[in-house]
Image: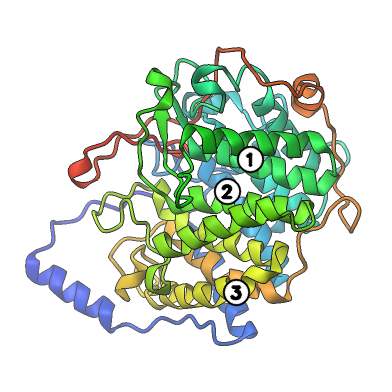
Amino acid sequence: MKPSISPRPTGVMLLAAAAFAQAQTSPFSIDSTAAIKQSSSTLAWDMLQYYKGNLTGQTPGILPGPPPAGDYYWWEGGAMWGTLIDYWYWTGDSTYNNEIMQSMLFQVGENKDYMPRNVTASLGNDDQGFWGMAAMTAAENGFPDPPSDKPQWLELAQAVFNTQASPDRHDSTCGGGLRWQIPFANNGYDYKNSIANGCFFNMGARLARYTRNTTYSDWADRTWDWMWNIGFIDNKNYAIYDGAKVTNGCKDINRAEFSYNNAVFAEGVAFMYNYTNGNATWKARLDGLIKHGMEAFLPKGIAVEISCENAGTCTTDMLTFKGFLHRWYSTITQLAPYTAETIRPVLKTSAEAAVKQCTGGALGRQCGFKWASGVYDGKTGAGQEMAALSAAMSLLIPQAKAPVTEKDGGTSKGNPNAGGSGDDAQKKSKPITTADKAGAGILTILVLGSACGIFGWMSVGV
């Protein structure tokens, strides 16, 4: 949603506005379960004021965009519905279930694999992956199943995974791994990045736990090993770097770090830890990712997007990342309960900071991005609301049931061959060597400080 044009504010006006915002008191509280649910309810409603897909003549499932038609790319709709599926599961509030169902099914695409033709120009593996992860969340949370004549949640997650596991995505450049973009004509097709591979790894780990099919865990193993060997995961401190161009074998790595890269891998590793009954190798990986993630993205206990926040260079996509950090780290505490003592107190401190600064916008309670500042920063949007909602509602995790599986309560029906690539994804285990297409999203260039590096974003692209 773009702001209306208004006269340029004077310095006095800006100071007055800042003082007014600082003087406001947030209406949100996380002091009790009831307060968290009430705050989450209001934050969810505020977030959906940016959604127009339920209005006559609009497209169900997507936020206004992509630019220049609006601020948001296609992936962020999938991220929002995934957030609201968790909202329903953790709060018990079914207010938005009809919108979730309509949107998740409307956007499945012609082949029911979350690749609708009308988003091809900005379609990345990470974009598709966010919709696939939302479908997987619906299966794991026991979200109401679609009508029998529609694709089912597990089936949709498998379709996304299968299309990404096929040889035309995992090519031989850089020794394997997914590219950012899917269509070879898209800007960014020559970039392999961590979020594309992170979404794929995350889905593989979750599908392995849900179905007990070792093909998925084999792919998770292979993806982790590729990330580790290529250097996208730092072998010393578990930092996860953004990616590299395929020229020169992905050796010129863009070392920007983003919280969602850490979180998507950490959650996937926690699923593998749980699936393998506490395997020591996966535990060591989980511990390494959490240690680095807490130090890098939750300094002083409050979430900060280190590669762009202080410089003021965060894109619309990046304004969502703290929400994924909160949601996925919260889920880790269910899958690896020994982590709860370390993670949950920090996430509570961060959530307190998140809701404290929600004092802006036309409603007087809308949220900004710079949580650590303690005050509303003057700009709100769907991403800021989604992140604050995620921070608040994730505090309900201690009362929530862990993600289910086919054997312990899951009702969603699957199809191992969904997505048209079942033979490749389910039967072949040898390394992929075919080169052709792959990728994700539209290339966004971001200059960070003196580094002046080129960054490929999942979401201008997710």
Residue shown at 76% from the left, 64% from the top: 402
| The quarter of the displayed image where residue 376 is located | bottom left
Residue highlighted by disc 3? 395
Q: Secondary structure at mark 1?
A: helix
Residue shown at 28% from the left, 39% from the top: 446
Q: Is residue 48 visible?
A: no
Q: Secondary structure at mark 2?
A: helix
Q: Is residue 134 visible?
A: yes
Q: CA distance from mark 3 to mark 2?
A: 21 Å
Q: Nearer the viewer, residue 395 or 143?
A: 395
Residue 358 % position (x, y): 40, 73
Which label's residue is closer to the chain start, 3 or 2? 2
| The quarter of the displayed image where residue 96 is located | bottom right
Other residues around mark 3 within 10 Å, as few (<14) / some (14–19) / many (≥20): many
Q: Is residue 390 above or below residue 382?
A: below
Which amino acid, by three-letter code, is at mark 2?
A: Phe
Residue highlighted by disc 2? 265
